Image (cartoon, rainbow, N blue to C red):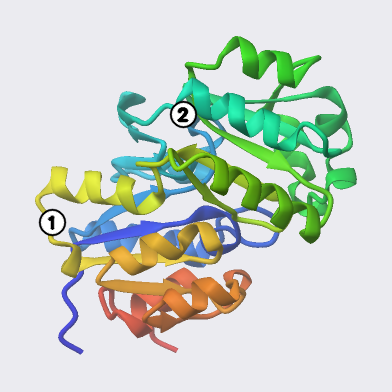
Amino acid sequence: MGIKIECVALDLDRTTLNVQGKLSPGNLRAIEQAINAGIHIVIASGRAYSTLPTEVTGIAGIEYAVTSNGAAIYRISDHTCLKQYKIRSASVDTILKMSADEPVTYEAFVDGAAYADRDFIENPVKYGTSLQAVEYVKNTRHLEPDIVQFIKAHMDELDSMDIVVRDAQMKKRIWERIAGADPEVYITSSVQQLIEISHRDAGKHTGLRFVTERLGISQDHVAAFGDGDNDVDMLKFAGYGVAVANASDNCRAAARYLTKHHNEDGVAYGLREILGCIPAEKL
C-alpha cells in the first residue's frame, strides 16, 4: 500500500480496550509487534493520567500519554508532565454559572487525578454511565463531598472538567451556552452523558502534535485510532485516521479508514490489514 507509519496514537475506551474495559491478547500482541517494528505508540485518552490502565501504561516501549483530552501530556517512564493547558479561572466560573440551574454533576481533573462527588461515585449509572464503566468510575475518582466547592477552590489548577448531564437536550443547551459565552475553552464529548471541557489550546490533536514534533515525525507518517467525537480532531490531524466500527457518526466521517469493532480487536486488524505496518497473522 506504500503506507509509512512511524507513530500510532491510540484512544483507549471503546477503541483499544474491549467492552469490559480490558486490553485483549490480540490487541496487546499487535501493539507489541508495532513497537518492535520501531513504531512509536502514544496513548491518547480523555482519561486523567492516574486513571490510565496499568496493563497499557506498563507495556514496554510506550513512551507518551496524551491525557484529559490533550490538556496534559506525560512521559510514562518517570510520570513527568511535559505539557499542560490549565483552564482559565474565568472559564471555570463561566462553566459553573452556565450549568448552575441544571440537575448536573461534575468531574474535575487536577494534575492527573480525577475528583467527583459521592452521589456520582456511588450511583454512576444514575447519571448515564454504562454498566461496564461502573467499576472504573468507582476505582478512579477521589471523593469530594461538595464537588462544586472543590472546583471553586482549585480554579487555577484544573486540567479539565466534565459536566455530567441527564439527556441530549440538556447537553445541547448547556454546550451552546458555554460555547457562546467563552471562546477560551475547548469543548468535546466522548460519550453521551459528558460535556468535556478544557483550555482552548487543548484537544487530543494538540497533544499528538506536541509528541510528534518532539519525536521529529511528520503528521503524514502518523496514524490515529478512535471512536468518539473527542477523537475527531486527532483523526483529522493524523495522516491516517482510523475509526473502529462502533465509532460515532462524526468520528467515522473524520476517518480515512474504518476497522473492526473495538470488541473484535479493531486496533490489531487496523495495524495489520489496513495500515500494513505489522505482519499479517497466519490463519
Name the residue at the top extreme: 153
Mark number, residue 20? none
Name the residue at the front extreme: 181
Q: Amino acid at mark 1?
A: Ile
Position of residue 116 measured from the top left corner of the image (x, y, whole percent): 72, 26
* Measured Cα–Cα span from mark 1 to mark 2: 28 Å
Question: As drawn, is 140 to the left or to the right of 54?
Answer: right
Give above or below for 178 relative to 121. below
Position of residue 255 measured from the top left corner of the image (x, y, whole percent): 41, 77
Closer to the chain start, of discs 1 and 2, is 2
Between 143 and 262, the one nearer to me in the picture = 143
Question: As drawn, is 63 to the left or to the right of 96?
Answer: left
Q: Return the residue at label 1.
A: 217
Q: Amino acid at mark 2?
A: Ile
Mark 1 against mark 2, which lies toward the viewer?
2
Asked if residue 265 shows in the view, the reply is no
Residue at the location (52% across, 34% down)? Answer: 48
Position of residue 167 measured from the top left corner of the image (x, y, whole percent): 82, 56
Between 236 and 55, the one nearer to me in the picture = 236
Give above or below for 220 relative to 213. below
Residue at the location (43% across, 38% down)? Answer: 184
Q: Secondary structure at mark 1?
A: loop
Q: Return the residue at label 2.
A: 87
